[in-house]
Structures are given as C-alpha cells and as structure tokens.
Image: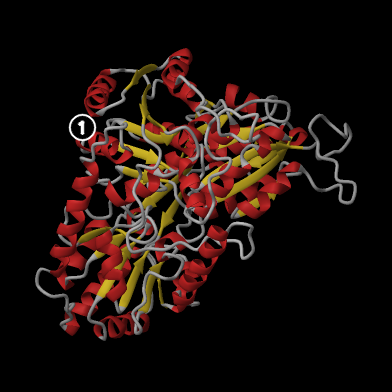
Amino acid sequence: MSTIRLTMSQALLKFLDNQYISIDGVESKFVAGVMGIFGHGNVTGIGEALERSPGSLIFVQGKNEQGMAHAATAYAKQTNRTSIYACTTSIGPGALNMVTAAGTATVNRIPLLLLPGDNFASRQPDPVLQQLEAGHDYTIAATDCFKPVSKYWDRIVRPEQLMSAALQAMRVLTDPADTGTVTLALPQDVQAEAYDYPTSFFEKKVHVVERLRPSTDAIKRAVGLVSSKRRPLIIAGGGVQYSFATETLAAFAEKFGIPVAETQAGKGSLPWNHPLNVGGIGVTGGLAANTLAKEADLIIGIGTRYSDFTTSSKSAFPHQDVQFLNININRMDAAKLEGTALAGDAKEVIRLLTEGLAEAGYASAYKDGEIAGVNAEWNAEIDRLYMLEREDGFAQTRALGVINETIDEDAVIVCAAGSLPGDLQRLWRVGSPGGYHMEYGFSCMGYEVSGAFGAALAEQDREVYALVGDGSYLMLHSELVTSLQEGKKLTVLLFDNHGYQCIHNLQRGHGSDGFGNEFRYRESETGHYTGRPLPIDFAGHARSLGLAAYKASNAEELRQALKQAKEETRSTLIEIPVLAGTNTGGYESWWNVGVPAVSESAKVVSAHQEMNNKLAQAKPY
C-alpha cells in the first residue's frame, strides 16, 4: 500500500482539497477554503499546514470567531449548499465563540465545518492555558459544548482517527437530509503528529447528491389526498431552493391553480409578481397568504420545517377539515403536524406528484379572480406602506420602499433579526433567485454583516446589502474589516431606531410599559434607561474602519446615497435614522410568546387572558 507521511493537519487539508459534490451531473469543488483566527491550539498545527501546504484552499483571516463562522454559513447558504468554508480556531474562548454560529447553521440546515483546537490528547502539559478542567470528568473540554448544536461531532485523539472522522464529516456535510454543523475537535498536539497515511485517502472523491424519491404507493396516497381537496395552499420553504426546484414548483402551481405562500427561507421561490405567489405566510406574513390559509383544506408544505412563525403558533390553519401533505427530504420535518409524509427530494417529488395529479385530472376549486383579488388588496397595502410619509421623521417602511425600487433587481439582501425580517417577508419584492438571504431559523443578531460578507464571497457579479438594525450592528460588525481586506464589497444599510425596538414593541404589546430595550442614558430619578437617546455616529464609526459612509434621513437622501454607494469600490455603510415603531404589524396572525399569569399590572393580566383565548383556538397537533 502506497503511503505518504504527513501531520494530521496537513492530511486534513489535503483531504478537504480533494472533495467534490455532484448534483444532476454537475460537479464542483466542495471546500473553497478555511477561515481562521490563530492562537495556541491551532497556530502551530493547522496554521503551519495552511501556510506551507494549503493546496488550492484559500485562507481567509477572520476578526471574530462567531462572525467568521456566520460568514461561512452564509457562503454555503448563498451557494445553495454546494460549497463551504471550514473554520479553525484556538482552544477555549476562540472555540466557544463559534457555538452560536454552530447552532445557527444546524437550525437552518446549512453545512458548516468547524475545526476548533482542543486540549493536549497526551495530557502531559495539563492544565494548559484556556483548558477547561472538569473535576468530575477529565475528558470534558470546552469543545464538548458543540455536541448539542452539531449534526456530527468527533475528537481526533490519534492522527489515524482522521480518516474515518473525515469521511463521516463529509457524509453529513453533503447530505441534504441531515446537514448542519460538523465539529472536529483537534487536540493541539495531535494536529502536529505525523502518520503514514494511505495515498488513496487523498484521491479525488465526488459526493453525489441523489434525488431521492418516495415509493409509488406513497405518491398514490398523496395524489388521493390532494384529489380529495378543493382549496389547497402550498407553503414553499428553503428546501425548494436548495433542491433547485423553483421552476418545477411554478409549473406545478400553474398546472393545478394552487396558490403559493412562502416562508422566510423560501421567499423568492416564485417571482414576487407571479400571479400565484401570495407572499409570506404566518406571523411575519402578509394579508394574502394568511387570508387564504384560513380557508385552506390542505396545506402542501414543501421543504419547510414548520416553525412557529410559519404556522402562527399552530393557529394559521383553522379549517375543520385541514390536512397536511409534507414534502421534505428530512423525515423529521415530513412527519410534523400529523401530516402525510412524502419523504424525498423536492424537485423529484413535485415532478412525480404533477404526473399523478395530471392523470387524475385534478384542478383546485378557487373561484375566478379570487387569488388575484387577495393579491391586489395586499399589493395595494405594500404600496401604501412603501410610500408612507411622516411629518415627525423617516418611516422604516418608506425607507424599505426606496431601497427596493432603487437597488439592482438582481441584488442580494441579507438580514436576520429585529423588526426588519417581518417587514421584509411582508413587503420586499424579490427580483431574482438568491436575492433574498434571510437567516430566520435562529434569527441570530449579528449574522447580518458577517452573512453579507459570506454572500459577497459567493457572488462575484451581484451587489450585496446587509440590512441591519443598530442593535445587531453593535453586537457584531467586525467582518467589515475582512471585507476590506479581501476586496469583497458589501453595503450596510443600518436602520438606527435607538435600540432593540422589535422586542420593545413585543414587550409593550403584552402589557409592559417598556423596559430595558431602548438605547438611552440611565436616569437617576427612575434608575432606568429612560433618559435621552445615545448619540451614536454610525457613519463616523464606519469611516474609522476604512469604509465609505453616508447618512440619509429622508427618501431623497437615501435614494442618492444608494446611487453613490453603488459607485463605491469598497464596502460602504449608509446610516438611516428611522422612527421607532414604524415597522409593519401582524396581518391575520398570532404568536404565542407566553405572558405572565400573575402581575401587579392589570394590562399584563389582561394580555395573559387574551393569550389564553388565542391559545384555545390553536390546534395541538
């Protein structure tokens, strides 16, 4: 057997550099490179390997471990899970900084490969700097914290263990049904140990993504179910886009006259102006989709995990005879809501279902003009909100209208948290596939700027915009420096409303007077943050980092700033002061957040009773 002597780190990089993915016969390189921040625990191991023998892998220097892992997640999402960056860190805090990003990737079903440093496997220098000494179990290390947020976890305590662990890692990363975060904990001594690896381990390996199909009987059952229903509604989730099934979905909906609602991850599955696209569904959905959902007798969920936002905490579908047909590659998601599971690849299942329903002569029973009518009403409401003028300041929905009409139709917007995701799912008119990049499985504050950098790495010819509130921006914006370093331009559209106003609204909507969510000075009289707003110069901060920056306080200033930003060749920030509370509200939807049953406030007790009334209307499933 032919062998080659390498350190474990060198072997890992050589292996990753030879991994490929194939979908529908189209083959592409799977691992683009490694993002990293060096410290003890990885600098002399995988760091040396990246310096001396990276092969074709690109190294990207991160500025915050969570931020770079978010960027890697966004890169994989923007490529429809066909390419990834791995992330390497030191032990201790460097590793633990990635735990939040690991959870974000796993919840969103996005492949993310993490390579944190770990304690010495030999234990001879114990305890080393940053080592977590658990007196009750000495095998526990900081990297054990990745176990609950990883789809696959392993610790490589001997260099030859890399071979089986690496193959298992690739199995999960390339599996559309089971993908998420993969964590390979790398003890710092083992990273530098040598082993005679078989050369066959480094041969090119192509991971073929099969379009799995359900059985003939399963399709027959699904055809029978759909055929028995008159008012079906499709919910398109992220799986539609990851399966490259957008055109197949459009043909299916058109053939049988079925309206299509979209989740945050599924938004853009159909063009916004397609006559059967009824927009966002659920808590952050719009009037058209939520109105049709109330009368739907069948929900056809395609590639959706049915989060509480999608189902309005299981209250969105009150029809007494409603049933669910769940098309999903992931069997756990396919089994939800007591639905009929149709496990398989979205594109292939839709194709087979189309054939069966066509043979059965099926057509939905929506009245002529009914879908067009609810869409016309909803589009008029979007137009109203996009043109909303306030004498006391700049309305957030007006700002979004200006942005939507000014930036390129094929531009990519990235968002994750705050009031903006609700406004965007309801109002944003998506110009082209991949143009709407929303992380809403975790709704992780701080993803926006890092995610935009990751999207910019994936997109060579499209403008990328991070839409972010001041709260999320203050949490994590360090990868802006990396974007400058890499020459990957992104534009930050920073909505400044002086705090965590989304949660402030939620708080006040359930009986509170408002507490701890606005960025204000503490008042000595009350002891609370009720003083004047903090005067933060976000544009000045961006300039100090090396970005171009503008400030826009009205529609015309914003329109001009957007045009100037497009001409910039480096990353740019536009500071947009907006009035707090000028975001959209709910449309025929409800969200169960839990309200105290006992309180000194009569408003809170009343809100609790109202919640109980709504809860009684929700289905237990």
Tell me residue 233's x, y (percent). Answer: 28, 70
Quarter of the image that includes the N terminus:
top right
Tell me residue 434's x, y (percent). Answer: 31, 44
Name the foreground residue: 515 vs 339: 515
Which quarter of the picture shows residue 116?
Answer: top right
Which quarter of the picture shows residue 2?
Answer: top right
- Which residue is located at x 36 percent, y 75 percent? 325
- Whether residue 2 is visible to the viewer of this picture, yes or no, is no
Judging by the rendered image, the residue that carries numbered circle 1 is 406
Which quarter of the picture shows residue 120?
Answer: top right
Name the foreground residue: 434 vs 169: 434
Name the foreground residue: 399 vs 203: 399
- Which residue is located at x 74 percent, y 33 percent? 188
Tell me residue 376's x, y (percent). Answer: 15, 58
Left or right of 306 in this view: 251? left
Q: Amino acid type of disc 1?
A: Thr
* Residue 260, placed above or below residue 59: below
Q: How many marks?
A: 1
Q: Secondary structure at mark 1?
A: helix
Tell me residue 340's x, y (percent). Answer: 40, 79
